[in-house]
């Protein structure tokens, strides 16, 4: 069964003007290969667009329903000013935040 977990993402606009942001949520799977963490799979879970006024802080409630069970997953939030590119990544994001998660099965 898919079980969603809620997360809250806070965005504070300190740009000096109103900004339209795009947020891309990725679930990335890593494996240790030759002693280093290597990205082996990536799934774009959600994309949001929000206009935030200068000085305003917005909290977005994001529910994530992982598609698989396992370890070494990284939940990554990418922030873009304006539209996101067709290949969103940490390298081309304006800001990013991530957390490592282990996904366990839910027994009922």
Image (cartoon, helix red, strand yellow):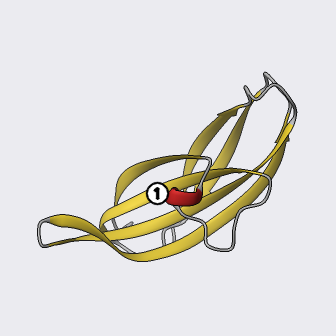
Left or right: residue 15 versus residue 53 is left
Q: Nearer the viewer, residue 65 or 54?
A: 54
Please tell me whether residue 49 is drawn above or below residue 104 in the rendered image: above
Q: Position of residue 31 (x, y in %)?
A: 24, 72
**Residue 64 seen by the camera:** no
**Residue 102 seen by the camera:** yes
Which residue appears at 79% of the width and 25% of the height?
A: 56
Please tell me whether residue 60 is drawn above or below residue 35 in the rendered image: above
Q: Residues within 10 Å of mark 1 (few under 14, many from 20)?
A: some
Which residue appears at 54% of the width and 66% of the height?
A: 65
Q: Secondary structure at mark 1?
A: strand
Left or right: residue 96 versus residue 73 is right
Q: Residue furthest top?
A: 55
Please tell me whether residue 70 is drawn above or below residue 76 in the rendered image: below
> Where on the picture, by quarter, is residue 92?
bottom right
Q: Position of residue 85 (x, y in %)?
A: 69, 67
Please tell me whether residue 90 is drawn above or below residue 2 in the rendered image: above
Q: Nearer the viewer, residue 72 or 37?
A: 37
Read off the residue under disc 1. 75
- For the C terminus, the quadrant is bottom left
Q: Position of residue 50 (x, y in %)?
A: 82, 47
Which residue appears at 73% of the width and 25% of the height?
A: 14
> Where on the picture, by quarter, is residue 60?
top right
Which residue appears at 43% of the width and 67% of the height?
A: 28
Q: Position of residue 57 (x, y in %)?
A: 73, 27
């Amino acid at each position: 069964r898919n079980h969603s977990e809620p997360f809250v993402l806070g965005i504070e606009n300190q740009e000096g003007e109103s900004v339209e942001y795009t947020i891309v949520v990725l679930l990335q799977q890593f494996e240790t290969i030759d002693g280093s963490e290597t990205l082996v799979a990536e799934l774009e879970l959600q994309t949001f667009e929000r206009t935030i006024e200068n000085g305003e802080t917005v909290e977005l409630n994001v529910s994530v329903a992982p598609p698989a069970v396992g370890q070494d997953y990284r939940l990554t939030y990418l922030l873009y000013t304006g539209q996101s590119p067709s290949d969103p990544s940490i390298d081309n994001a304006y800001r990013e935040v991530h957390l490592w998660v282990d996904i366990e099965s839910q027994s009922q």
